[in-house]
Image (cartoon, rainbow, N blue to C red):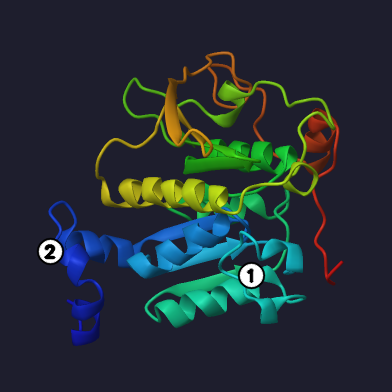
Amino acid sequence: MFDRQQLDRYARHIILPGVGAAGQRRLLDARVLVIGAGGLGSPVLLYLAAAGVGHVTVVDGDVVDASNLQRQVIHATDAVGRPKVEVAAERMRALNPDVHVSPVDAVVNAGNIRALVREADVVVDGSDNFPTRYLVNDACVLEGRTLVYGAISSFEGQLSVMAGPREGSEHTPCYRCLFPEPPEPGTVPSCAEAGVLGVVPGVVGSLMVNEALKLLLGLGRPLRGTLLTFDALDARTRSFELAHDPACPVCGDAPSITSVRDQDYATFCGVPLPEARTTAP
């Protein structure tokens, strides 16, 4: 089932109750889609590779900038100016050659998102803008895939497990259930505008990959229907129960959103979906 090198590499998983050899095999057979190879994506991608998740697709249309290095730990100084997905894929393969990494040097949009989501067992969204978050959420609902969501700002972060197939009579709330309307453009500053403590995406991203591994292994109680917040200054987490909205336009009882179009998200959020950068700023 495993060769000698794999037995050594995954020894701490194989002896772990609840994981074992069967669980490690599930990880090696699993497919995860990660949106973003930045602050949140860095720990997610590194820990997915270390854990032996066999197939990881990472999507990001950006290049490494010197300002990223304070928090995006998958990138190094000599990577400045290179596509983030290429650098991330190299680091992951060096960490664990068992992992098949598919780097997609592009931004997600209506033309590619559903096909990307469809191929994944779990989707992890580490994007940093509202149009992309709504787009990824809607694609996950339409394709019946579970979404691990996370966001950060300054000294704070939040995460949840959303969307996914209905489980019996239970329906997991989606991102639109939590945020029926996006904030007014310009009211929520980006990390470039507000700053972020470098360790915050590391903490939140690690919690996100923990949720992804729990989902893949069928362990514990994933954060379905729960929003977890993290405050770095108080070293405190809080949990808030989320309710499914039967009137939600994408996952409700009578959905009005049955497809995805770029213009819909630009109009809804008041800002367009981001475009890929091909050179360093």
Classify mark 1: helix, strand or loop.
helix
Tell me which label, 2 or 1, sits earlier in the chain: 2
Tell me the number on the disc at residue 29: none
Residue 153 lies left or right of residue 80; in this view the side is left
Rendered view: 60 above or below 213: below
x then y, percent, for residue 83: 71, 73
Residue 239 lies left or right of residue 18; in this view the side is right
Classify mark 2: helix, strand or loop.
loop
Task: From the viewer's side, name the closer residue of 249 and 74.
Answer: 74
Residue 272 lies left or right of residue 201; in this view the side is right
The quadrant holding residue 35 is bottom right
State the residue at coordinates (67%, 69%): 84
x then y, percent, for residue 37: 61, 61
x then y, percent, for residue 256: 67, 23
Tell me the number on the disc at residue 15: 2
Rendered view: 249 above or below 165: above
Real-space Cα separation, disc 2 to disc 1, in angstroms? 33 Å
Tell me the number on the disc at residue 85: 1
